[in-house]
Image (cartoon, rainbow, N blue to C red):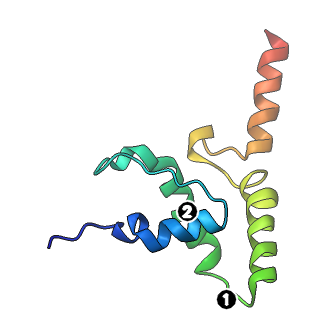
Amino acid sequence: MKRYRGTQYVSNSFKELLKRNNITQNMSRSKNCWDNAVAESFFNTLKTELFYQESLKNKSKTNEMLFEYIEIFYNRKRRHSYTNYLSPSNFEEEMLQIEMAA
């Protein structure tokens, strides 16, 4: 039997776990890496910049670390290649200045 990556996510036990927790599963098309590229890139960055640098103590501390990383650092301060390496707040300021000048 040939096994593909991700088979655990289509198993009946996994689907039942999702159902018990009221979670809707959303699968990309088979063998199409571009369907989920943005999410994969974000989670790679998250793991590299946060989880590989910190030890996870407990669920509460992990939730706090995630919130601080995403809401305080990633969404406000971290420079992003998509915005020409400006932080989101600097990018927003620059766009407002351009809009006001127009």
Quarter in which the C terminus is drawn: top right
Viewer-nearest residue: 96 or 3: 3
Q: Is residue 34 above or below residue 55?
A: above
- The residue that label 1 is drawn on is 55
Q: Say if 5 sits above or below 96 in the image.
A: below
**Mark 2 crowd level (few <14, some 14–19, many ≥20, 10 Å Cα):** few
Identify the residue shown where x is 36% and y is 66%.
6
Q: Give the amino acid type for the residue marked by disc 2 in the picture.
A: Phe
**Residue pictured at 42% horizontal, 69% vertical:** 12
- Residue occupied by mark 2: 43
x and y percentages locating residue 15 in the rendered image? 49, 65
Direction from residue 40 to residue 79 in the image, left or right: right
- Residue 94 sits in quarter: top right
Q: Element under label 2?
A: helix
Name the N-terminal-most of marks 1 and 2.
2
What residue appears at the point 51 percent right and 48 percent down from the top-left corner?
38
